[in-house]
Every structure is written in C-alpha cells, then in structure tokens.
C-alpha cells in the first residue's frame, strides 16, 4: 500500500513538479518496504487458542499453516492472516479463478451472508459497515481489475484518509481480546455488523456476516490477530482453533487448501459453541486465492 503511494508521488514529479513531494514519495517507498518485509512483523509468542470465527465447512486459503507471512506481507498486522471460503457441498470443487462468468453477484456465493462469530470474549474497538459489496473478481479479467483498483484507489485512499487499511479491509470489526491481542474480521457484508464501538461481546456472539467488500475477489472472511489497535503499527500474532479435517479433530490452523469443518458440526468445540446474537448497544462506555 505505502510502496504504491510512494511510487505515485515519486514518479509523478513530471506532473506535480514538486521535488519535496517526490522526496516524500521515496521515503514512503522505503517505509512501505520495511513494513512489508521486516522480520519485526513476526511474533515469537505462542499461538492464541480461540474458537473458530465461522461454523460449517470451509476452505482455508492464504493460510499461515502453509507460509509466513501468509499474504506475502507483514503490513497491516496480517503476518498470520487466513482467508476462509465457505464450500458447504463436498461434491463442489472450489477454484480460485473461473473462466466464466467474468463477474457474478455476491449473493450467488455460499459464503455471502454467513455469520461471523467472536472467537473469544472481547471489546469492540472499531467497526465499519457502509462499504458496498461488489461483484466477484475471480476471473482473470476481473482479477486484473481488482489489482489495479487496489493499487490506484483502495490502498492510497486508506493511507490518505489516515484510516490504515479501511478501504482494503472493507466492512470490518476489530476486537480487543485483552493481553495486547486484537482480532480483525474483514470483507463483511454491508450493514451486517451487529456490534458498536465500546461494546463487550462474548465468545460465540455474532459480529456480522461474510460479505464481499474491500479488496476481495469473492465473498470470504479474512481473519487475523495483531498486537496493536492500529493496523499501521501492528505486528501479526499467531492463532489456533479447533476444527475437523480428514476425519480428525485438531487444534491449530487449517491449511494446504484442504476443507475443514468447525463449530458444532465438527464436534470439535464445546456444546455451547452455537452462534447467538450479540447484545445490542455499547457496554458501559467501557478472520490460485481470494484477494486479501
């Protein structure tokens, strides 16, 4: 994100004619490269064990079980981020890219509208729910458009509005889980967040619904943990949750593009792990490949 903005400022010298802006652009490029690839983005702490933020049968994509950083960057605290695509029918083979249609309505994907649950008790520190759910970008022509849109619009706009990755994450919720750990749930459905800033939630409360907002190729949940409230300065934190894969119940992070089942359907969690609506109102003032 910062690298693209810096390049625009630096290479735009012929247009704006301002050498100060050009030098500032070079500094932004250096900062962006540092935040993206610096080893400081890795955490030495043990994985935080949580409940799964989704229930049912899902496909893990861009998983930290396969590589770190999972999304190719430490930026925005997403070193250990995972993308979860809902694939309820075992007979359906999920593919990252399709030949046709070039684009489809988000409502045609099984993940769209699925509930997203709090994986632990926490306090809501950020909510965004007004961005639109766009059509899919999981064909080659649409994917190229997604990349151009992200570089020329979403990433620079997020930076210029001092909103960290707001336009990259799309509609999202950030929870303070305590002990310096924050959970991010991104690409939520427009208008679906059921929580407000300052509200206390319990594990299993429904935070919102899976959507296709922000820098997303198809409806899916992007989930990660980080060690600061602001994405701009946060480092990623590893996590683990209970799930069933290949007939075996495990606690860790699903990966390898192998479908898994989580929640009561898997028999991998406590009996009270069914989702339930979050309480309304704030509490006493006091998460081939989908795009990341």
Image: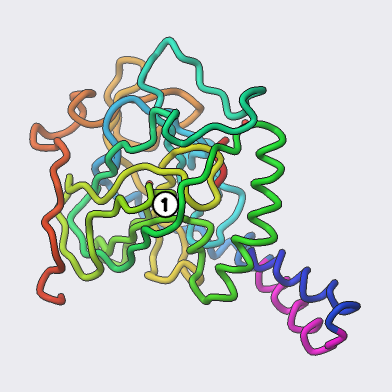
Query: Is the magenta region chiefly helix, strand or loop?
Result: helix
Is 83 on the left-hand or right-hand side of 9?
A: left
In this rendering, is residue 161 above or below 100? below
Residue at 61% across / 63% down in the picture? 155
Residue at 37% across / 62% down in the picture? 128
In front: 270, or 171? 171
Label 1, secondary structure: give it: strand
In front: 90, or 171? 171
Which residues lie in the magenta part? 17-32
- How far from the left and from the top, in percent, is residue 26? 77, 77
**How dense is the environment of label 1, judged by Cα within 10 Å: few (below 14), some, or many (20 and up)?**
many
- How far from the left and from the top, in percent, is residue 195? 22, 59
Quadrant in the picture for the N terminus? bottom right
In this rendering, is residue 283 above or below 148? below
Queried whether the magenta region covers residue 29, the answer comes back as yes
Residue at 29% across / 34% down in the picture? 251
Residue at 81% across / 81% down in the picture? 22
Circle 1 residue: 186
- How far from the left and from the top, in percent, is residue 166? 48, 63
In this rendering, is residue 76 above or below 25? above
Is 285 on the left-hand or right-hand side of 189?
A: left
In front: 177, or 289? 289
* Residue 200 found in image quarter: bottom left
Queried whether the magenta region covers residue 276, the answer comes back as no
- How far from the left and from the top, in percent, is residue 170? 46, 55
Q: Residue furthest right?
A: 14
In front: 221, or 49? 221
């Amino acid at each position: 994100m910062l690298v693209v903005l810096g390049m625009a400022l630096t290479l735009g010298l012929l247009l704006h004619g301002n050498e100060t802006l050009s030098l500032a652009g070079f500094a932004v490029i250096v900062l962006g490269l540092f935040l993206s690839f610096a080893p400081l983005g890795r955490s030495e702490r043990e994985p935080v064990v949580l409940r799964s933020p989704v229930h049912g049968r899902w496909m893990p994509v861009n998983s930290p079980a396969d590589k770190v950083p999972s999304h190719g960057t430490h930026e925005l605290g997403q070193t250990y981020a995972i993308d979860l695509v809902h694939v309820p029918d075992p007979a359906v083979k999920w593919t990252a890219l399709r030949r046709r249609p070039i684009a489809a309505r988000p409502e045609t994907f099984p993940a769209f509208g699925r509930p997203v649950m709090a994986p632990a008790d926490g306090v809501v520190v950020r909510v965004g729910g007004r961005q639109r759910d766009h059509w899919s970008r999981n064909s080659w022509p649409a994917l190229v458009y997604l990349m151009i849109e992200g570089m020329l619009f979403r990433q620079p706009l997020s930076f210029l509005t001092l909103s960290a990755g707001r336009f990259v994450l799309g509609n999202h919720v950030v929870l303070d889980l305590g002990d310096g750990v924050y959970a991010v749930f991104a690409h939520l459905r427009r208008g679906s967040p059921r929580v407000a800033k300052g509200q206390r939630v319990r594990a299993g409360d429904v935070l919102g619904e899976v959507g296709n907002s922000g820098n997303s190729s198809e409806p899916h949940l992007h989930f990660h943990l980080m060690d600061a409230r602001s994405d701009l300065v946060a480092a990623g934190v590893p996590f683990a949750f209970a799930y069933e894969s290949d007939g075996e119940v495990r606690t860790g992070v699903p990966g390898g593009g192998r479908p898994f089942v989580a929640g009561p359907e898997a028999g991998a969690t406590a009996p009270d792990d069914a989702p339930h609506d979050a309480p309304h109102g704030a509490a006493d003032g006091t998460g081939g490949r989908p795009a990341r």
